[in-house]
């Protein structure tokens, strides 16, 4: 069984995505979820139930998933006895997973009440770690595998594993980012999370280094421009709305009151970012055009989602981009993710390789 953390309210979208992927890869199994519970379980098929399933041990590529923030494999559900026996029960079950882990994360899906649930189980963290270490479940592990102890409620948890090479680097897939002092909007956190999610830290130093040039479409009041300027990037902020004075005071941000869909750069730039609120397929076509015409090398953009059939909308936008780039010379890479700081939107990254 696999467990996927997602945003509360997006379980059906996460399940639809997993079901489509599994079908394409002829992996047997089914998604189980309850609306609002902020996670989806993928129950692996038994050969007798689905004889045509080729891959009962299916584990998808986490980086390619849109709605899953985090992915746990080798999962087992555990009904908990009285609290006094929790530690020994968890340690015994963890031993049955049959491998050593480098570290253990205590977590709960990001649903209503998660904060109280986590506060209630926090006192367990230290004694549990000590008991896991003593039982040699925790110790040196070459691959750095993580043990997840994920409380669904006060009587039930899921024990699972994650591989750092195929999962998010944060517990529950939630990066804890600091809101920068004086930021004009919370929006900048989205771009910060997108950069940390899509680009390796060492690569980022080169690709977003001081002196590079970026266009920020739909920039007002300037949260994204400020994140870029903080890295020494020169930004052209395109929006009819006002840009906060603190952002202009960096002297790295030039404001242009123009339409994002008509704006053209004077010469090719390194980056284009786009947070314009418009029909998602229109944004998809716009970013594809920027890459196809070579106006920028890479782009990060937001796609606002409809109230239902959100997975289908993401697929539609992926097709718009792939179709627009089909005849264009050279390869490109596209990823789309529902970030922690996204609400009813997803964030994409498109890059010329
Ligand atoms: C969500 S806000 C952007 C927030 C911004 N990224 C930040 O960090 O502060 C969307 C912006 O898109 C702008 N916008 C909408 N349609 C536009 C268009 N056709 N051309 C330029 N800007 C547009 C709006 O004026 C608004 O300021």
Image (tube, helix red, strand yellow):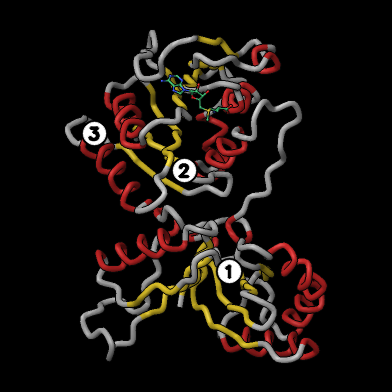
- Residue at the spot of label 3: 325
The answer to whether 131 appears left or right of 239 in the picture is right
Q: Distance between the residues labelled 1 and 2?
A: 31 Å
The alpha-carbon separation of the residues under discs 3 and 1 comes to 38 Å
- Determine if residue 149 is in view: no
Q: What element carries label 3?
A: helix
**Please, is residue 217 above or below residue 245 in the view?**
below
Secondary structure type for disc 2: strand
- At horizontal 57% and vertical 49% (from top left) the residue drawn is 340
* In the rendered image, the vertical position of residue 281 relative to residue 221, given as above or below: below
- Nearer-the-camera pick, 147 or 261: 261
The residue at the point 33 percent across, 34 percent down is: 284
Q: Name the residue under label 2.
A: 345
Residue on which disc 1 sits: 145
Report the front residue among 36 and 221.
36
The answer to whether the beta carbon of the residue marked 3 is less than 8 Å from any atom of ligand 1 is no
Label 2 crowd bin: few (<14), some (14–19), many (20+), radius 10 Å = some
- The image quarter containing residue 297 is top left
- What residue sits 71% from the left and 37% below the top? 179
């Amino acid at each position: 069984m696999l467990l996927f953390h997602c945003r509360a309210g997006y379980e059906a979208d996460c399940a639809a995505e997993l079901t489509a992927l599994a079908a394409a890869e002829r992996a047997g199994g089914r998604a189980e979820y309850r609306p609002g519970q902020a996670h989806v379980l993928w129950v692996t098929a038994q050969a007798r139930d689905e004889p045509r399933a080729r891959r009962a041990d299916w584990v998808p590529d986490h980086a390619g998933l849109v709605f899953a923030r985090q992915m746990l494999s080798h999962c087992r559900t555990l009904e908990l006895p009285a609290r006094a026996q929790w530690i020994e029960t968890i340690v015994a079950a963890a031993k049955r997973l049959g491998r050593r882990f480098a570290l253990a994360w205590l977590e709960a899906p990001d649903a209503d009440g998660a904060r109280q649930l986590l506060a209630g189980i926090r006192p367990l963290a230290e004694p549990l770690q000590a008991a896991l270490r003593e039982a040699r479940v925790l110790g040196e592990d070459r691959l750095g595998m993580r043990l997840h102890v994920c409380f669904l409620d006060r009587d039930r948890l899921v024990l699972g594993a994650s591989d750092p090479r195929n999962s998010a680097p944060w517990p529950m897939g939630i990066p804890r980012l600091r809101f920068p002092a004086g930021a004009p909007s919370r929006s900048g956190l989205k771009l910060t999370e997108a950069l940390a999610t899509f680009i390796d830290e060492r690569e980022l130093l080169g690709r977003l280094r001081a002196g590079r040039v970026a266009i920020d479409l739909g920039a007002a009041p300037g949260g994204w421009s400020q994140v870029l300027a903080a890295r020494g990037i020169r930004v052209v902020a395109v929006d009819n709305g006002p840009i906060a004075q603190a952002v202009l005071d960096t002297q790295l941000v030039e404001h242009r009151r123009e339409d994002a869909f008509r704006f053209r750069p004077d010469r090719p730039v390194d980056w284009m970012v786009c947070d314009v609120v418009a029909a998602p397929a229109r944004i998809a076509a716009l970013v594809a055009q920027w890459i196809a015409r070579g106006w920028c090398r890479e782009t990060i953009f937001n796609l606002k989602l409809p109230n239902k059939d959100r997975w289908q909308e993401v697929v539609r936008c992926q097709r718009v981009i792939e179709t627009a780039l089909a005849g264009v010379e050279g390869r490109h890479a596209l990823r789309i993710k529902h970030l922690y700081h996204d609400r009813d939107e997803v964030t994409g990254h498109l890059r010329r390789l």
